[in-house]
Image (cartoon, rainbow, N blue to C red):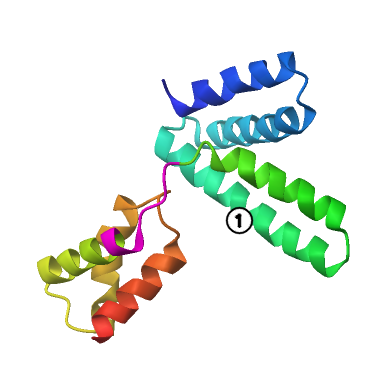
Amino acid sequence: MELKQILLSDLKGAMKSRDSLKVDTLRLIVSDIKYKEIDLHEELGDGDITALLTTQIKRRKEAAALYEQGGRTDLKEKEEKEMAIIQTYLPEPVGEEELKQRIAEVIAETVAQGPKDMGKVMKVVVPEFKGKAEGDRIRKLVTELLAS
């Protein structure tokens, strides 16, 4: 089943069980998906939806940090609960060792020889791990492995 269909069926289930936090979170996600589809004039695939969910998580992390600075622990907890709901729809994150191993393979394949070749490596690795690893994490590992 497509991720979009899973989100819609879970939204219906949350409505029936009267789980207002989950309903609000899923409605926002489904709304974002629809706006993106209207903007692009095409249906979004699972990869695009995963990227959208990752963006939603980043927004909530930032909001939670701001709420914590402002002393609003109630809103911070709400953001963290929403992050947990969204996290259930993302694929399992890739382990550090698996990511390092694949980056090392790509470095060997592309014959990258230093930081100047970072673009070659990133161009191959980022699409492979889209939604499974954050871009910053990938960038740090690529930089580390190219420096050694």
Q: Residue at x 25, y 59 (%)?
A: 124
Above or below 116: residue 14: above
Q: Is residue 137 magenta?
A: no
Residue at numbered disc 1: 58
The secondary structure type at the circle numbered 1 is helix
Residue 96: horizontal and vertical position, in percent? 35, 63
Residue 44: horizontal and vertical position, in percent? 46, 32
Residue 135: horizontal and vertical position, in percent? 43, 63
- Looking at the rendered structure, the kind of residue marked 1 is Lys
What's the magenta region?
91-98
Q: Nearer the viewer, residue 28 or 99?
A: 99
| Extreme residue in the right direction | 71
Left or right, 8 with respect to 99, comes to right
Left or right, 83 with respect to 87, comes to right
Q: Residue at x 32, y 80 (%)?
A: 144
Q: Quadrant of the C terminus?
A: bottom left
How many numbered badges does the structure rendering display? 1
Q: Quadrant of residue 120?
A: bottom left
Q: Residues within 10 Å of mark 1 (few under 14, many from 20)?
A: few
Q: Residue at x 45, y 59 (%)?
A: 134
Q: Quadrant of the N terminus?
A: top left
Left or right, 121 with respect to 64, comes to left
Q: Nearer the viewer, residue 43 or 29?
A: 29
Q: Is residue 96 magenta?
A: yes
Q: Quadrant of residue 22?
A: top right
Above or below 86: residue 138: below
Q: Residue at x 28, y 75 (%)?
A: 118
